[in-house]
Amino acid sequence: MATNRKIRKISDSTIHRLSIYYRALLALEKEGYDTISSKELAKREKLTPAQVRKDLSFFGSFGTRGLGYPVKQLMQEISDILGINRAWNVALIGVGNVGSALVSYKEFAKQGFVIRLIFDNDQRKIGSNHKGIVVSDIAEMGKLIPEHNISIAIITVPGSAAQKVCDGVVECGVRAILNFAPINLRVPDDVYLRNENMAIELEHLSFLLRNMEFGIAE
Amino acid sequence: MATNRKIRKISDSTIHRLSIYYRALLALEKEGYDTISSKELAKREKLTPAQVRKDLSFFGSFGTRGLGYPVKQLMQEISDILGINRAWNVALIGVGNVGSALVSYKEFAKQGFVIRLIFDNDQRKIGSNHKGIVVSDIAEMGKLIPEHNISIAIITVPGSAAQKVCDGVVECGVRAILNFAPINLRVPDDVYLRNENMAIELEHLSFLLRNMEFGIAE
DNA sequence: TAGCGATTGTGAAACCATTCACAAATCAGG
DNA sequence: CCTGATTTGTGAATGGTTTCACAATCGCTA
Ligand SMILES: NC(=O)c1ccc[n+]([C@@H]2O[C@H](COP(=O)([O-])OP(=O)(O)OC[C@H]3O[C@@H](n4cnc5c(N)ncnc54)[C@H](O)[C@@H]3O)[C@@H](O)[C@H]2O)c1
Ligand SMILES: NC(=O)c1ccc[n+]([C@@H]2O[C@H](COP(=O)([O-])OP(=O)(O)OC[C@H]3O[C@@H](n4cnc5c(N)ncnc54)[C@H](O)[C@@H]3O)[C@@H](O)[C@H]2O)c1
């Protein structure tokens, strides 16, 4: 099992690529592959075979020399590693444009990320029903989050409210946050924070376009 | 000027941090700061002073020794570098849950990313009005995208349609794509592609939570 | 205008991630 | 059961990014 292996430090890029491998394997399984070599997997995802092997080797030896990796088994291993072989209870705070889109996205639940609670501070929204979930008052967070065993909070409130909301969910014992507000949230060291910042991605594209003509991007 | 400097290769991380510096400077300006030291800027964004200085030094010498960086001027320099000192015409393809959220987000336009065209292939949506923009038939892309001088395409169609849509916008001459579909798009080498994959971020959090108990994350 | 304290800008060092290269292992076919 | 073709798993080499450390520079004050 990959779970009780002693691991020192896995880089963010490796974790990111594990997600990519998982998606590739899903497709390969559908296409009827039983095994896949690092060479072919790498080709599909525009990576190198060595990188695929090195990434996987941090967690164990899942392949068969001369043959490759068994597709189904490797999927199982990666979902063990990523922790997506189980359900996580998720709370979403701020059911506006982005929040509504996320709530109605069925793939998350299929993947094990189940939105159990929705919070807002707008009286017109509190009590309304979103895909079967009644929107709760943000003031109820302290009671409801521990009750529902929430592991992950998704923050989709305006930037001006995000830090306060973040402090609130941390206070409730949530240790993992996905933040959509375009600000740098301050969290304690033992809380995991990931940011989804669409403006930064657009700015990156803008940089690339802007500098194309100067020959920066090789 | 930062624009006509000879630059070899700037790392993705540096570009990402430039966006972060820009946001920090916006806040600092509001708070009334005239100058800011790399030390304080780093502290605010949980980075190191050396990193701030090194990042900026790739593009020029914007600071004053003994004093720090002039806030307003540095903002100007960074927006020159990132190319956000101008407007970019953007097309959005797929006006579903995510697409609608993006269209109604006013901050993008304020930042210079102006959505000029919206495409869909759903007859019920074509012709409807989203924030003043009439949704066009995807079949019109070849005509409208060149006409409107579109630089960036945002793809918010289901994964199954994304590659085809992507090929279409590339065909129209678009060189920068922001993709929300959870698949690895294939684009020619001279097309810039950035992915916004929310599931991968959730999986990263799941990994961290999953492995917390085994002492991986130091 | 000289001296002090602060802070930049930048080579060099340290660190981390990726790629290389090959021994070890397995499969398949006779 | 042996042989050749294949592919893994992994130390070592390479390449890239971050941090260190300090000379150079500037503002300020007297
Ligand atoms: N809409 C987009 O396309 C987009 C793009 C990039 C980033 N973002 C960011 O995502 C976040 C959400 O954007 P949006 O467009 O959905 O905004 P929105 O205004 O549509 O929704 C925000 C929601 O949060 C609620 N809210 C506000 N303060 C709250 C508080 N203190 N406690 C609980 N709920 C509160 C509001 O009632 C509202 O329902 C913002 O930070 C925005 O900057 C949005
Ligand atoms: N909704 C979310 O919260 C969420 C989260 C993560 C990822 N995503 C991804 O973002 C993308 C969009 O998600 P969504 O929830 O907005 O989906 P959606 O079904 O609500 O919207 C998709 C839109 O694309 C249009 N479309 C479909 N095929 C098209 C084609 N060939 N040409 C033009 N338009 C076409 C549809 O008519 C629809 O309007 C998907 O790839 C999804 O996987 C969504």
Image: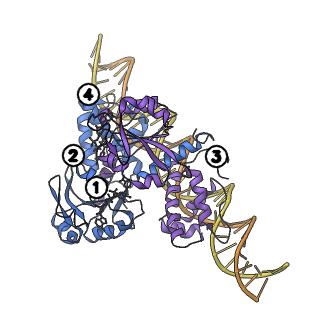
Chain colours: A blue, B purple, C yellow, D orange
Asked whether the beta carbons under mark 4 and mark 3 sit within 8 Å of each other, the answer is: no
Question: Residue A158: x, y in percent?
Answer: 36, 62
Dot 3 crowding, Cα within 10 Å, few <14, some 14–19, many 20+: some
Residue A31's mark?
Answer: 4
Tell me which amino acid carries mark 2.
Lys
Between the C-alphas of marks 4 and 3, the distance is 44 Å
Mark 2 and mark 1 on one chain: yes
- Residues at discs 2 and 4 both on one chain: yes
For discs 1 and 4, the disc positioned in front in the rendered view = 1
* Separation of marks 2 and 4 at Cα, in angstroms: 23 Å
In the displayed structure, does residue D26 sit left or right of residue B68?
right
Name the residue rendered at 36%, 60% in the picture: A193
Q: Secondary structure at mark 4?
A: loop
Q: Amino acid at mark 4?
A: Glu
Pointer 1 residue Cβ closer than 8 Å to ligand 1: yes
**Residue at numbered disc 3:** B7
> Mark on residue A106?
2
